[in-house]
Image: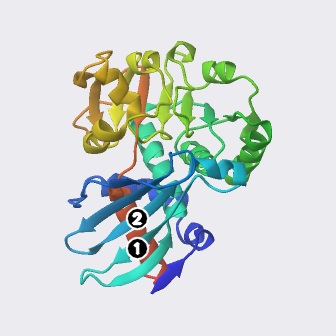
Amino acid sequence: MLILNAAQINALVPAHGVIDLMRHAFCRDYVVPDRQVVAVPGGNGDRLCLIMPAFDPAAGGVVKLSTIFPGNQSKGLPTIQGTIVVFSETGTPIALLDGGAITRLRTAAVSALASMYLSRTDSSSLLVIGTGELAPAMAAAHCAVRPIKRVRVWGRREQAAASTAAAVRALVSPDIEVRVSPSLEEAVAGADIVSCATSSSEPVLFGKWLKAGCFVDPVGSFSPITREADDDAILRSRVFVDTYDGALKEAGDLLDPLERKIITRKHILGELVDLVVERVKGRTHEDEITLFKSVGTAIEDLALAHLVVESAAGGATDE
């Protein structure tokens, strides 16, 4: 069985290639059962285990096992960890991949893909809210598709924000200015793109801070009881999601205002595939605020896992 760690996966797959891979993946006829969310005993009662399967009828499938342990931050460990088992078309386990690396690469790539339809083409300033392992990957992906000149990083802990900024600098062009922002409100007000990658259970991003024409990318919350963006941010935005199936079951940023009738289902204008095949128009004018709510889908894990396995075997394509 092929076993690959995070460093090996990162070396095999160029980030820009993952963005195009995701464009094709959302148009494929993959079979994606509902993911299972299991409570894990211990901690503060907030530990979870996610089981995410996906299958290509002609080429096997994957199952991702992820743990979410919020208490790990105090131990210097990632909040989200996991592994992906890859099966051949005969059901034979053929690879074991680092789940964190796959998740970071595919999550960031999907947000960058959405940005290509929803952010202004002249977007030059990016704000990353959050200091977890996903944050640098989000910054790098957004910088790959827009002419970003300034990246700001905000986090509740100063040292963590500084470390995240350093990690971002290592991934983006040296011509891009990367700094820690002491004021979240000021950083939001000056950003063309706002990417949230936090584990916050309550909103950290407020709609009254958003400037005209910005693109909002909240990816951190993926349960009905967690939120990163407040009601005003949702109301002011043209809203799109990665998939209706996932978002309408797990996106607290949308489910909470839907339940309280702050918005209706019609406020969600489309899913990512609608943008990719041009069924729905993304950005319609320069001053509107757009928002892409992603909770993740095993479609992404399946496509990237297959590419990684092919690359390791020396049989990768340019797709």
Q: Is residue 176 above or below residue 207?
A: below
Q: Name the spot of residue 232 as percent of width and height, x first.
A: 45, 15
Locate residue 205, reporting x and y percent. Answer: 55, 24
Q: Looking at the image, which residue is at 65% across and 19% down?
A: 185
Q: Residue furthest top?
A: 208
Measured along the vertical axis of the image, is residue 226 above or below residue 113?
above
- Residues 173 and 44: in front is 44
Residue type at numbered disc 1: Val
Which secondary structure lies at badge 1?
Answer: strand
C-alpha span from label 2 to label 1:
6 Å
Residue ID at (40%, 64%): 64
Q: Nearer the viewer, residue 105 or 226?
A: 226
Q: What residue type is labelled 2?
A: Lys
Instruction: Estimate how packed mark 2 is, as few (under 14), some (14 to 19) or many (20 or more) residues with alpha carbons within 10 Å.
Output: many
- Quarter location, residue 80: bottom right
Residue 181's place in the image compared with 15, above or below, is above
User: Are the residues tagged 2 and 1 within 8 Å (C-beta)?
Assistant: yes
Look at mark 1 in the image and give the residue it sits on: 85
Residue 245 visible in this rendered orientation of the protein: yes
Name the residue: 50% across, 41% down. Answer: 220
Res 51 quadrant in image = bottom left
Res. 64 mark: 2
**Element carrying mark 2:** strand
Is residue 207 shown left or right of residue 156?
left
The vertical placement of 220 against 35, above or below, is above
x, y percent for residue 141: 55, 48
**Which quadrant: the C terminus?**
bottom left
